[in-house]
Amino acid sequence: MTTQDHRADLDHELIEAAARIARTRCRGENHTMAAAARSLDGRIITAVNAYHFTGGPCAELVVLGTAAAQGAYDLDTMVAVGDRERGVVPPCGRCRQVLRDYFPDLKVIVGAGGTLRSVPIADLLPEGYVWADHQLDTE
């Protein structure tokens, strides 16, 4: 098995984990998206969004908190999947910014159907603001 084949298998496993959560846990208008992330040690962390008209957190952001609560601080790849069999959904602008700030080397699975691919988060936010570059040194 080539490295590329192995990567594709891992990505498929992550998509399936998110899709399973979307099918079994997303109910009604409060929870419409599921996300799954893989940590560098191979764990898969899943979560759903918490929709609220005031701007409740997206599933991708809930995954960040869930991962931290489980001691998974190094995420490698993430994907979001919509309920009602909507398939892979790319992260919104806010999530792109947060994901890039927390995990600048993160890969995100995007695309549809047979064109799914894993891309660096920086590719989804070109010319993006890098929060860490604008923090004052504390020394």
Image: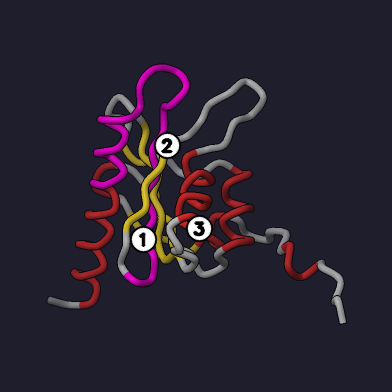
How far across and how far down the image is residue 127, in percent?
68, 61
> As displayed, is residue 5 above or below residue 93?
below
Lateral position of residue 50 relative to residue 134, left or right: left
Q: Amino acid at mark 2?
A: Val
Check contact, mark 1 vs mark 2: CB within 8 A.
no
Q: Amino acid at mark 1?
A: Arg
Lateral position of residue 43 relative to residue 132, left or right: left
Q: Residue at x 71, y 64 (%)?
A: 130
For marks 3 and 2, give the CA distance.
15 Å
| Residue 103 found in image quarter | bottom right
Q: Which of the image's four quarters has the C terminus?
A: bottom right
Q: Which residue is mark 2?
A: 48
For marks 1 and 2, give the CA distance.
15 Å
> As displayed, is residue 25 above or below residue 70?
above
In the drawing, what numbered circle is on residue 38? 1
Foreground disc of the pair 1, 3: 3
Read off the magenta span: 16-41
Q: Amino acid at mark 3?
A: Ala
Between 131 and 124, the one nearer to me in the picture = 131
For marks 1 and 3, give the CA distance.
12 Å
